Image (cartoon, grey):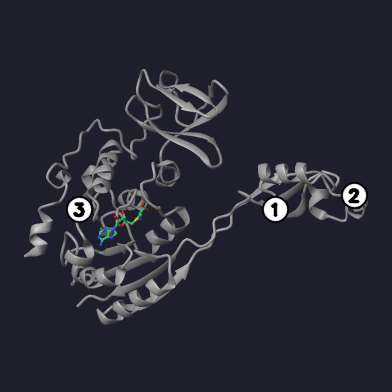
């Protein structure tokens, strides 16, 4: 009974999913940027801005101002001049959206999102339940993966979060494939029962939602469950619940990404190496003594330690980039519920 009452508290989109054919979409592939499109203004690695293009508006950035008028009609991917330098106008993807979205909560980043999509065995047509919605970072990746024929039910206990994501889905043309639901999944479970192909959990007490996940998954098709938790104690309790409620092939993985940039640098001579006694100083050409300069250069380039090799065109170094690399984000525990 409680579940039925809570279900009435779903946001309006459940009943108003009709898609506006002119709605700007993350799927629209026109060559040129139109008014109403969401565009990603790419300044440099780590600095992107998502804007809804509207005549009369100006994007104010640390790097200068950009009037939206200049964007309309430009081909996607254009390099355009702002008042203090160049920026690129990129078509939104779920990855670029994750980088630029307004954050209301902790979010999942590309490396975790990519593995989650694969672990859920998601494809166009899949029906997926997710909780919590949070800032909608993963929700966008899930919605784009199930479209155009599947569906994402994304649940959050906090109504303001589902409302905001619902509005973003509308702006991005994803309303038809998504239903944001205000619901405590640990108490009341998911919006669908015996219907979905996969459940994803990013909630503080996933073990309480796991019996409901088993209920949401289609009994005839079976399905996948993936749970994200920052702490190993959460993983232990989640695994116990998974076993108890019939899930099999339970496994936990953690991704610690390390990104690199390949830059061209001067060849390091043996004399330079001997003189400085410091391979980093030699490869970055600072003479090995000026630490402040070296630190600034390292921060700019992300050069912490470089591995050099020679190409026909010159000497290249692979450096970790950015300098401060993300480390632990969380554990991904995944399992299968076999068809009955
Ligand atoms: N994966 C999201 C971030 C989720 S943050 C992203 O990539 O953006 C965790 C969210 O879970 C919060 O918004 C919180 O409100 C929600 N939450 C916590 N407990 C919940 C519960 N029992 N039922 C539904 N949502 C819950």
Q: What kind of element bears circle 2?
A: helix
- x%, y% of residue 72? 40, 22
Front residue of this view, candidates 19 and 129: 129
Quarter that holds the N terminus: bottom left
Between disc 1 and disc 2, whose residue precedes? 2
CA gap, disc 1 and disc 3: 45 Å
- Secondary structure category for the residue under label 3: strand
Vertical position of residue 331 compared to residue 306: above or below? below
Tag nearer the camera, 1 or 2:
1
Residue 19 in percent (x, y) is at 19, 38
Answer with left or right where residue 48 lies relative to residue 229. Answer: right
- Report the residue marked by disc 1: 304
Q: Earlier in the sequence, mark 3 or mark 2?
A: 3
Residue 153 found in image quarter: bottom left
Residue farthest front in this picture: 292
Q: Which residue: 55% across, 28% down?
A: 63
Q: Neighbour class for label 2 at 10 Å: few (<14), some, many (≥20)? A: some
| Residue 196 point in image, percent of width and height | 22, 63
Instruction: Indicate which disc residue 182 carries.
Output: 3
């Amino acid at each position: 009974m409680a579940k039925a009452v809570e279900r009435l508290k779903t946001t309006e989109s459940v009943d108003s999913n009709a898609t506006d054919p002119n709605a700007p979409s993350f799927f629209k592939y026109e060559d040129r940027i139109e008014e109403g499109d969401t565009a990603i203004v790419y300044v440099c690695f780590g600095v992107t801005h998502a804007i809804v293009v509207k005549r009369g508006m100006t994007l104010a950035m640390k790097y200068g101002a950009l009037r939206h008028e200049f964007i309309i009609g430009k081909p996607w991917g254009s390099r355009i001049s702002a008042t203090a330098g160049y920026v690129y106008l990129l078509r939104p993807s779920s990855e670029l959206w994750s980088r630029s979205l307004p954050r209301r909560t902790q979010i999942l980043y590309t490396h975790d999102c990519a593995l989650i999509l694969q672990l859920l065995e998601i494809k166009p047509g899949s029906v997926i339940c997710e909780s919590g919605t949070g800032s909608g970072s993963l929700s966008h990746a899930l919605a784009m993966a199930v479209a155009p024929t599947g569906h994402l039910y994304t649940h959050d206990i906090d109504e303001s979060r589902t409302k905001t994501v619902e509005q973003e889905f509308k702006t991005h043309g994803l309303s038809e494939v998504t239903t944001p639901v205000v619901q405590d999944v640990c108490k009341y479970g998911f919006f669908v029962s015996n219907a979905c192909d996969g459940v994803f959990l990013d909630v503080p007490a996933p073990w309480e939602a796991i019996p409901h996940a088993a209920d949401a998954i289609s009994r005839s098709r079976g399905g996948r469950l993936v749970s994200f938790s920052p702490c190993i104690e959460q993983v232990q309790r989640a695994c116990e619940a998974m076993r108890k409620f019939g899930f099999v092939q339970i496994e936990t993985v953690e991704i610690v990404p390390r990104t690199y940039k390949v830059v061209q640098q001067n060849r390091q001579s043996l004399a330079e190496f001997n003189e400085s006694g410091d391979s980093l100083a030699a490869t970055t050409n600072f003479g090995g003594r000026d630490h402040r300069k070296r630190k600034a250069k390292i921060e700019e380039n992300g050069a912490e330690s470089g591995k050099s090799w020679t190409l026909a065109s010159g000497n290249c170094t692979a450096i970790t980039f950015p300098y401060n690399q993300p480390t632990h984000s969380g554990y991904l525990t995944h399992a299968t519920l076999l068809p009955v």
